[in-house]
Amino acid sequence: MNDLELQLEHQPVSIQTHKVQRHNLNLMYPEVIHLNPPMVQHTINTTIVNAVNQQLHEQGFPKNPQADVTAYYEIKTNERRVLSLSLINYTFSGGAHGMTIQKSLTFSTKTGKSYTLKELFKPGSDYVGRLSAMIQAEIKRRDIPLLVDFKTIRPDQDFYIADKSLVIYFQLYELAAYVYGFLYFPISVYALQDIVVEDGPLGSMMY
């Protein structure tokens, strides 16, 4: 690969923000633009829109007339043909406080594929056991009071990629009380390099 090809390989994709504002809804979500081939761009954007709509549905919008929604996104990684982002939806329907849910998506901007946690690792590798042990140690180190005993992550646990880390996280109430918010556990890709798929998103971060 020559210098120009290498430079293009590391180029971020262009993203524009869509805003939807109407009664009880303040929504911002990302759209990938100017990406070739167009089919890849379409696949990524369709996946994003479907996830945004799913979050609205889960939070009871628009069926619940009392639901007041603020939704936005955060880009976690946009380099080396990897796009990783989080969609965050806060909905208030009365009571002491609202509810926030988060959905993260990690794409190959080469193919448009959206990756599950399992697909980041070599087939047959005990990624669940490895990640769970690291998170267990971190819970103890941070002395986080849990609502339930932590034994293991789900095979499809929520995650995103940021810098050279895999960030595993838990939804509100999934492990700890509301006041603790989302619990995030960043894990260096180098601590996982023996089980990472080399041509997958985590492999791209290593080299």
Image: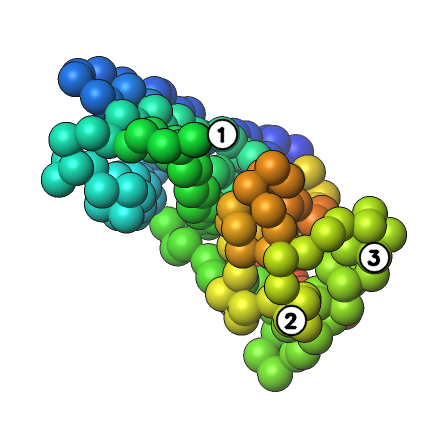
CA gap, disc 2 and disc 1: 27 Å
CA gap, disc 3 and disc 2: 14 Å
Are circles 3 and 1 on residues that touch, CB within 8 Å?
no
Q: Which mark is residue 7?
A: none
> Which residue, given by chain and number where applicable, does mark 2 sit on?
152
The reply to whether residue 81 is in sight is no
- 94, above or below 193, in the image: above
* Horizontal and vertical percent position of residue 128: 64, 72
Are circles 2 and 1 on residues that touch, CB within 8 Å?
no
Residue under the image location 14 percent in, 31 percent down: 65
- For label 3, count other residues whose C-alpha is less than 10 Å away and answer few (under 14), some (14-19) or many (20+): few
Residue under the image location 66 percent in, 79 percent down: 125
- 69, above or below 152, in the image: above
Q: Nearer the viewer, residue 27 or 49?
A: 27
Q: Secondary structure at mark 3?
A: helix
- 116, above or below 42, in the image: below
Q: Nearer the viewer, residue 171 or 54?
A: 171
When asked about the image quadrant of residue 164, the answer is top right
Labels 3 and 2: the sequence-earlier one: 3
CA gap, disc 3 and disc 1: 29 Å
Residue type beneath disc 1: Glu
Residue under the image location 63 percent in, 46 percent down: 183
Q: Which mark is residue 74?
A: 1
> Which residue, given by chain and number where applicable, does mark 3 sit on?
140
* Horizontal and vertical percent position of residue 7: 60, 31
Q: Secondary structure at mark 1?
A: strand
* Horizontal and vertical percent position of residue 4: 59, 31
- 138, above or below 29, in the image: below
The reply to whether residue 194 is in sight is yes
Figure quadrant of the N terminus:
top right
